[in-house]
Amino acid sequence: MVKRIIVLTVVFVFFNQLTQSQEVIFKGNPDASFENARQLAFNQQRAKAQDTLRLILTKYPNYHDVRSFLASTYSWDKKYDEARKEFQYILDINPNRKETWIGAINNELWADKPGNALEEVSKALTFFQNDEDLLYLKASALEDSRRVADAYKIVESIVKQNPANQKAVEYKNKLIQKTRYNSIGFSSTINLYSEIFDPAQEYALKIGRKTSIGSIIGRININNRFDDTGLQFEIDAYPKIADGIYAYLNFGYSNTNLFPDYRHGAEVHFSLPYSMDGSLGYRALHFGNSTTKMYTGSIGLYTGNYYIMFRPYFTPNDAGTSTSGTLTLRKYSSDEDNYLGFSVGLGVSPEIDQLDLITNAFTTIDLKSQSANFSYNFTSKTLKHAFGTKIGITHREKSFSPGDYLWIYSLGVSWELRYR
């Protein structure tokens, strides 16, 4: 009995080792299989494609096109470490493969490692001196490293070398935009009421500057309503705190009933995993001896060319806490200044809706309101000018007659000039 167990154990171990020692070796046409793998990868079947690519490499380890494409699929799947190993394997054997260098550099950029990307592109340029594609990637890495001025010099050299390089020309215009640290702007909004009130006009003049620690904006708001005209002086600042974190600070002053006497606010914005962002903050509006405080925040998600964001407001008052919120959807085109937007809101926020500020009704009544707004923002070809349009409609409860509603129709336009 013991001998039989020993024999069976030896046989089991032998066959187990034999099985483990046998590797699956590719059999077939590598070119045809490679093309099939490409089709799978481009049809959202990357796992199957990667299985095929790895199988081809068991017999043809130096089929560099296959390995390079495998590395690229790893990059698309955010498996940056695995992609890096495959790209490096190829470049150690054959550093004269420009496309492999481009893939390796892009892998570092997508992994948010611009320092590594700069190292890779420097090596690549020793083999392909003054290559436009590699110089373009170098500029991208410099921009990601917050060296915008250096990135601009690189792209400017590409355009001088080849003025027909439209991709470089567009990138140059984009970087020019980022080096335009000053701006002035104007906006105008008209509100038409379905009853009782005459049309109200709102205007704003602003001047801004981007600094090394963040942006600062000064603004004069002009309000013409209730047969009166008033001014508000306001300043906004967006100081950077750390990578992915910045603050919003606000202070305003007015000596007219059309605005609060003073206003101030603060908010912290931060990046979150999975292409999300968020914020937490407060606003305060001072009217004579009373103060309206609001607590707010936001949660946003980037998905493709779309951005979805929800912002609530909580306003404590003598009757409890009034709640309002806005859901915003944006579809971006070329950049953050070019988008089509839509938003819907429920409830009245003292920060946004100032119809009843003159009676300070927000502190005593939880008004009901529903609103919808469409916006379209775009820039000039040189990105020097930015324009905005907005149209909105609001169905709001009257503060002086709870239960009764009126309609408000809004139309707004804006313009901004960016300059060095």
Image: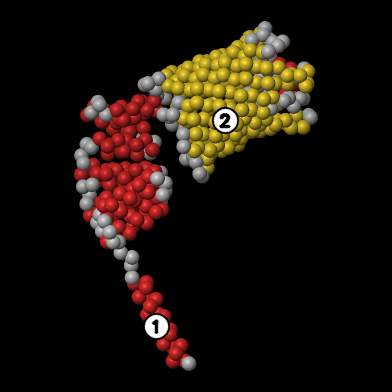
Image point (63%, 12%), residue name: 192
272 and 205: which one is in front?
Answer: 272
Residue type at numbered disc 1: Val
What colour scheme was applied to this rendering of the protein? Answer: secondary structure
Q: Secondary structure at mark 2?
A: strand
Q: Mark 1 highlights which residue? A: 11
Image point (40%, 45%), residue name: 43
Q: Nearer the viewer, mark 2 or mark 1?
A: 1
Image point (35%, 75%), residue name: 18
- What's the distance in space between the residues labelled 2 and 1, CA to CA? 68 Å
Give x and y (percent) for residue 261: 66, 19
Q: Is residue 162 above or below residue 256?
A: below
Q: Mark number for residue 328? A: 2
Q: Is residue 5 above or below residue 297?
A: below
Image point (43%, 84%), residue name: 9
342 and 366: which one is in front?
Answer: 342
Give the image quarter of residue 400: top right
Q: Mark number for residue 322? A: none
62 and 261: which one is in front?
Answer: 62
Give x and y (percent) for residue 207: 49, 19
